[in-house]
Image (spheres, rainbow, N blue to C red):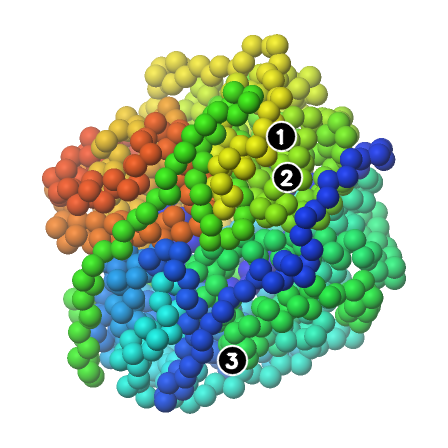
Amino acid sequence: MKLRLFTASPLALGAALALAANVPATPVFAQDAPAIDAPQIEAGADLENLVEQVAIPYERFQLENGLTVIVHEDRKAPIVGVAVWYNVGSKDEPEGKTGFAHLFEHLMFNGSENAPNDYFQYLQEMGATDYNGTTNFDRTNYFQTVPRPALERALWLESDRMGYLLGAVTQEKLDNQRGVVQNEKRQGDNQPGGLVFYEILETLFPDGHPYQHSVIGSMADLDAASMEDVRSWFIDNYGPNNATLVLAGDVSAEEARPLVEKWFGDIDRGPVNTPAAADIPTLSEDVRKVMKDQVAATSVDLYWPAPGITSEELTALNVGTRILGGLASSRLDEILVRDEQLAVGVSAGNYDFQRVGILNVSATLKDGVPLAQLEARLKQLIDWYIETGPTEDEVRRAATSELAGTIRGLEQVGGFGGKAVTLARGEVLAGTPDFYARQFETLATLTPEDVKAAMEKWMTRPAFTLVLEPGEREEEYEEAASVAEEDENASERDRSAEQITVSKERPAPPIDTIATLDFPDLQRTTLANGMQLTYAQRDAVPATYVTMSFNAGSAADPAVMRGLENLTIGLFDEGTEELTSQEIAETRERLGVSISTGGGDDRSTFTLSALSANLAPSLELFSQIIREPAFNEKDIDRLKSQTVTGIRAQMRSPQGLAGRAIGIELFGTDTPYGGVTTIESVESIGRDDIVAFKDRWIRPDNGEVFVVSDRPLGEIVSELNAAFGDWVAPSVPKGEKDFSSLASAEVKGNRIVLIDRPNSPQSVIYGAQRTDLDASDESWVDFTNANNSLGGNFLSRLNMNLRETKGWSYGVRGGPQARENAVVYALGGGVQADRTGDSIAEMIRETSEFLTTSGVTAEELTRNVASEVGALPGRFETSPAVLGAMQSLTLYGRPDDYYEGLVGKYEAQTTESLDAAARAAIDVEDFVWVVVGDASKVKPQLEQLGLPIEVRPMEGSETAGG
């Protein structure tokens, strides 16, 4: 069970809706095959060497008002990651004020005295990327990556909300954001298993414990929050002496200090928040509870309280749980999933917070297996592991894989996991920015005895066992008080009525120049096997990324066998002619290499992320996986079982139900982009089908290679030829896709499909149409920027209306979904159930007016062009981003200088050109609307819209015959 440990603004939802008509690839678990003498693939880097490569040098200073500043210089791109961490989280909230830290995270995005508009407006004007804010138990943070010329503007913005916020906080903003937070809670609670984390906290932590209440808090506490409560909370917790500012990127400490002094230096100190003390509780005895929800399969989870991040045992517990159930080669994977096949999935992890942690071990029951058998065996294996401890090889593999991933991640300066966040987390939660380095030093010298001792200490204590079974929820759901107000919208915001008091005028500094994108030069050559290679050199980290892309994808599925491509691709690393899947997993971990599959509708891809020092053995393993898959019957049966569980999960998730339905509505069942993977279609697939798919589609004459590396092209070609040069296509004909049926697939729009999901506190709405757009057309850039006004980002009209004005949703987006031979436009999001009909009416109105009387405004054009141009350097900061862009260039037939040419295209845009592109592409009367919600509450609302309504039961429910 994935825990909801923090909350974030809806930018993480993405710019558009996923309309996958096929089941996404299920987690791949290694197989248990007869032992054979496997060839040795030796690694070339040891732990000590890897630790030396994980370095984030920094300078630290403090202003007179107590603000701590950390600067890391990284000149690889003209961007700077800016992160502000406040030393306050939900654990610091007193009784009766739960959820305040998170509510304030929202309010601090809603404008300050000198930046009175939504902060996303200013961030977009700067060309910021990777921007967001989050709250967890221990801290509140804000982060953005900005072009270097916009750094001073970003510091002005962050300093204004730190020192000059209260004059801009109004009752209207408080009411509106209270409604937004309530919808954020509904969105999470509406997911299968969405109520589980509350139960975990209430069981593991005693009454009054700082970690017992969730980050999002109580709806009753939020309903009761007054303006005076809000003002007091800000004064007590958001002063400069309770904050840390981190700058990472194209700036030195010498350059940064005067700018920081200028904008933050005159902010007054505030009270110091001493983080709430919190004991590590111990249950008096084992506790076992059973919950029911609309989940696909029964799961068994065990939880233990554990120490926090500053514990000397932290690294040992992290490594120990990874070996038990976190690695692909883990003990539980090998025994429960591959060998005994009692479970379709397992996991183990350590969720570490500042004062405490939560250890978790989980297994998901396979169909037909008695729950008691899995639960008993899981506990037996945990006891056995604790008693025997890990091996030296297991510890080194776990350490190597973690360090290798960290090295590859050092390219990113900002975002959720960049270097700025790493430094800030150490400073705020552990008292030192180089906390990460100390942990890695421990990791390099960790012994099996260290791991065994830590596991014995914490995982032999009484545990909380939680069984989550399919069924109707039995818990009473706490709804916000505002929902009962039928005649008014308590969270609606009237911006014109808001009065802002400016205590000190602080004009925004200018942005005098534009950072330019330097997209790497692309080089091409042909490998010995005839595959074309496209190469780009990036030397920020010692890593190589290789994607082998084959012209297949889910569009290559036979109409009567949907899911064949997904199942086949997932089986490639389940064993080869020479290696078992356990050996594959162990070799990957020793090398620190990641091998993944994917691709989507049009392509099937295999991607390798390797340390360049280990490139040769990594490519040798990569070659065996792609060229010599074993497709053992035992593995096929196991992956089919996992895939079926994934389908059932989709059929219980509101987003999954909507995505499965909308694909068929737009493309029918017989076109390459149509249909949907079903339990029946997966169960019909046999080994012969899988082998035939591989022979027709995964072959050198149907693929090409993309590489981003710090190594020169000649070396890359030599290594690829050594691993793949003698690969020849089989004698069977190459596969061909037929898209002729797309033209004749009729789509009837202007109607509603309502999928009944009883007791849903929120409705999920998708509105979509097939368009005549082509991602390779010159007008594509005009359309995508026009859509930024309608649905493409936080400031779009749809989101600002339904979230920031009405308060009915946590977030609404709209955007194009590009395929090689079709483009879908889709909009939607989750809305509170009692406003479903009103929300669709607003979506229709906003879209219709945008396409007729109220097109792109001059203000929107200026802001969106500045955002798109300024964001270009940040968009391609990392090698994986460049690798994806290279593949898009090929898929859509774009020139190599496409991205560097975007600036000219954006600057040439006019309101008229954007309006023309949008109006030529979409028509709201062609939209098919899919709504997933409680039909008893939602249908009467939808009837007021005057559109035809078809009510369907949930796919797979008893009413639907499943």
* Quarter of the rendering occupied by the C terminus: top right
322 relative to 493 in the view: left or right: right
The residue identified by callout 1 is 722
- Quarter of image, res 882: top left
Is residue 233 or residue 935 the one in the foreground? Answer: 233
Instruction: Give me the residue at 72% from left, 53% from top.
Output: 397
Q: Categorize mark 2 by other alpha carbons within 10 Å: few (<14), some (14-19), many (20+).
A: many
- Give x and y (percent) for residue 780: 26, 34
**In this figure, what is the number of numbered marks?**
3
From where the camera sits, is residue 400 visible? Answer: yes
* Quarter of the rendering occupied by the N terminus: bottom right
Q: Earlier in the sequence, mark 2 or mark 3?
A: 3
Q: Categorize mark 3 by other alpha carbons within 10 Å: few (<14), some (14-19), many (20+).
A: many
- Quarter of image, res 197: bottom right
- Give x and y (percent) for residue 10: 40, 56
The residue identified by callout 2 is 616
Q: Categorize mark 1 by other alpha carbons within 10 Å: few (<14), some (14-19), many (20+).
A: some
- Give x and y (percent) for residue 229: 38, 82
For the residues bearing labels 1 and 2, Cβ distance under 8 angstroms: yes
- Give x and y (percent) for residue 374: 80, 48
From where the camera sits, is residue 90 visible? Answer: no
Instruction: Give me the residue at 23% from left, 31% from top.
Output: 778
Secondary element at image label 1: helix
Q: Residue furthest front?
A: 714
101 relative to 166 in the view: left or right: right
Q: Earlier in the sequence, mark 3 or mark 1?
A: 3
Q: Real-space Cα distance between discs 3 and 1?
A: 58 Å
Which of the two marks, 3 or 1, is nearer to us in this view? 1
Kindly identify which numbered label has been placed on residue 92.
3
Q: Real-space Cα distance between discs 2 and 3?
A: 51 Å
Which of the two marks, 2 or 3, is nearer to us in this view? 2
Kindly identify which numbered label has been placed on residue 62.
none
